Amino acid sequence: MIKGLHHNAYRCRDSEETRRFYEDFLGLPLVHTLKIEQTKTGRATGVLHTFFQLDDGSCLAFFEAPDMPFEFKEQHDFDLHIALEVEPEALEKMQAKGKAEGREVRGVSDHHFIRSIYFRDPNGYVIELAAKVAGRESDMDPGKNHARDMLDKWQNAKPAAARAA
């Protein structure tokens, strides 16, 4: 039934600032913009919806909605991050590019099945560039990695109050 991801959408402070990061820095082309002047409930608004395309055709999308308050804050990796797959040789290249532009760059982090570097976009979101590690494909195979068993053990080990939440 579900064929794949079409887009994930996030708020942005400024569409052009966001475009510079996603298109100019990361290389994701701006493929569509949609100006929204009226909500489906009939309220007048002024929102710009932008779409940046990944190689598989899916998109990262953003809403700039100046008339709708939103608390932008630097996100913690565990709260929200966007992980984008890259080829292994891209990690060092993008790390160097980020440092040359004066961007905060973290990593390279070895997660065994992927290696990653991290940036912040202009909106405070953590952007992870992740490269698969050859020979570790079974790490993402639930028939071999016991993902469900690990989740069940985690769930059962939590205090009852946390399980009910």
Image: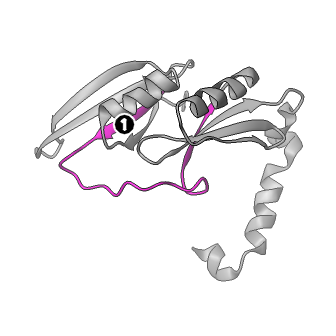
Relative height, residue 112 to residue 53 (above, below)? below
In the foreground, 123 or 5: 123
Q: Nearer the viewer, residue 19 or 95?
A: 95
Image spot of residue 9 (x, y percent)? 41, 39
The magenta segment is 59-85
Q: Foreground: 152 or 56?
A: 56
Residue 82 shows in this picture: yes
Q: Which residue matches tag 1? A: 62
x, y percentage for residue 39? 17, 42
In-front residue for pair 2/127: 127
Q: Residue at x 90, y 28 (%)?
A: 135
Q: Position of residue 72 (x, y in %)?
A: 37, 54
What quarter of the picture does the N terminus occupy?
Answer: top right
Q: Position of residue 88 (x, y in %)?
A: 75, 24
Q: Is residue 160 above or below residue 67?
A: below
Judge whether 79 appears above or below 31 on screen: below
Q: Is residue 132 magenta?
A: no
Query: Is 95 on the left or on the right of 79, as rendered?
Result: right
Residue at the (15%, 46%) spot, across then down: 41
Relative to 54, is 62 on the left or the right?
left
Indicate the quadrant where residue 143 lies: top right
Q: Residue at x 21, y 46 (%)?
A: 66
To which quarter of the image does residue 132 belong?
top right
